[in-house]
Amino acid sequence: MSLRVPAIPAIAMAIKHASSWRRWLIAFAAGATGALAMAPFNFFPALMIPMTVAIWLIDGEAQGAGRIEISVSAARRVFADGWWWGFGYFVASFWWLGAAFLVEADEFAWAMPLGVAGLPAMLAFFPGLGFLLARLLWSPGAGRLFAFAAALSFTEWLRGHVLTGFPWNSFGMALGGNLVTAQLASLIGLYGLTVLSILMFSAPAMLGEKPLPIGVTRRLPPAVLAAILAFGGICGFGVWRLSQATAPPVAGIRLRIMQPNLPQDAKFRPENKAWILNHYLDLSIRESAAHLGLDGVTALIWPESAFPFILSHDPRALAVIGAVLPQDTVLVTGAAREEDGLRGLPSYFNAIQIVASGGHILESYDKIHLVPFGEYLPFQSIFDRLGLHQFVHVPGGFDSGSGPRFLLIPGMPAAAPLICYEAIFPGEAVSAGLSGERPGFILNVTNDGWFGMTAGPYQHFAQVRLRAIEEGLPLIRAANTGISAIVDPYGRIEGEMPLGTEGILDGSLPQALTPPFFANFPFAGAFAIWVGVLSLALTIRFRY
């Protein structure tokens, strides 16, 4: 197989020899294009640009290098290349965080640059480190692809774990956002997809070798052919798995998801309490083609932090809700919860609560993985002295729950509860480990209203849908502004309410699958692939 690509070696040479600010501008722009591979665009070929440019950038810092030796100045340069590359990617991926600072603009607008640029600047440390580690493993030819994939996927794993972790838009989501290619996550999870994405999408860098004489046609490099075949194999596996896919409904269970689409600036105002509760109830009892109001509904599901008050402390609100619920229907809702804490001070939790007919709270689950600066302040004493607080107006912020566990909803299989941010962590969706028990579905309640009509809610939904594929469990999702959905254990959407709409979604609960490989061994597949890639990088490096 041959290809005429006379311009690519010239572009590669220009990038390798670019200096100072031009080099950083190239790195920033190339990194930014990678965001097009993520939701809502899901144009996975876009990831070839940042990955290919990254190889050429490191090439430029490795010219004439010895085996492993690298000077301090060269280390700084290659780290800077990776930092600017990562900064571009994260700014383009997370620009929508700025919307949260405008919900209460009079209080938080001044801090918008901290979210839009500050967080990307900190996260860019990880690809900077990845570039540096890759440079230490660098060798000519295809070996450098393995070096880059091993190093960058390792720092992506670090990004998902250091300081509670932030794996949002890990590079594996380029494959994880597409239903067909995402099926491989049932074996190797997000981090396995990340190793393969980096390796495959950096292969076009091999087209940037020295130009051939005029009239000579270059044969397609073996590494590029291998990447094409690997991608074809991933697609083939996905098509095969989906062709075998059956997920019949669980008998006797009918669900209703309510999506209120409330503006975030109105949602937490206590003076709106009565209006908000009436709005929820009016939507919840609407007639549909499936139900006459709530008749026949097993569980009515409301989104995260549904009330601007403590539900368990408001017997009148509980009585109003309880009067609407039929005898065999329960409400599953997000709600803040309060209990006595240390030294007599109250502790607050972001919770999911189950309310039965008559207004009794049957059970609660408290969120474990809290959002830094959103639900609590790291180094709180320092920020308190500066007069700053987290976005959610809870004195002292939320406390973390005592540990993962299943949520028992009457008339339904056990649920694996995930509140908002908790859904982005692979391997943690089903982490209760209760003597080998397995839940029947993933329950995700969220409030993406902070981010308006931006890319953020689409990215969030794409990640929690990947958790369903990894675990082989159906997903039931209720979001304030959207996207609410019922998703089967293969990631297929059986019902959906789009972003920015209000209404109800009626449906059944799909059956769970026999646990796929990832569900039994969450990181074994990814680790095996990473070790193989690293071993190849080291073998080629030391042969060179």
Image (tube, grey):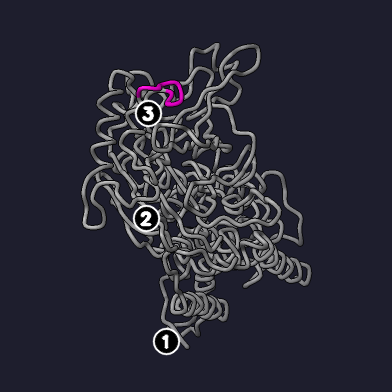
Residue contact between numbered discs 2 and 3, judged by CB atoms under 8 Å: no
User: Looking at the rendered structure, which numbered label has been put on residue 215?
Assistant: 1
- Identify the mark nearer the N-term, 1 or 3: 1
- Give the label, 1 or 2, closer to the camera: 2
Task: Name the secondary structure under disc 3.
Answer: loop
Task: Name the secondary structure under disc 1.
Answer: loop
- Give the label, 2 or 3, closer to the camera: 2
Percent x, y for residue 171?
51, 57
Q: How many marks?
A: 3
- Give the label, 1 or 3, closer to the camera: 3
Q: Is residue 270 left or right of residue 376?
A: left
Residue of label 3: 307
Name above or below for residue 22 compared with residue 521: above
Percent x, y for residue 296?
33, 52
Q: Residue at x 54, y 17 (%)?
A: 383
Task: Name the secondary structure under disc 2.
Answer: strand
Foreground of the two, 193 or 511: 511
354 in magenta = no
Foreground of the two, 530 or 292: 292
Residue of label 2: 254
- Crowd tier of the residue under label 2, counting other residues whose Cα lies within 10 Å: few below 14, some 14–19, many 20 or above: many
The magenta span reads: 310-316
Residue type beneath disc 1: Gly
Q: Is residue 542 visible?
A: yes
Label 1 to label 3: alpha-carbon separation: 71 Å
- Identify the mark nearer the N-term, 1 or 2: 1
The furthest residue to the right:
542
- Crowd tier of the residue under label 3, counting other residues whose Cα lies within 10 Å: few below 14, some 14–19, many 20 or above: many
Foreground of the two, 363 or 243: 363
- Crowd tier of the residue under label 1, counting other residues whose Cα lies within 10 Å: few below 14, some 14–19, many 20 or above: few
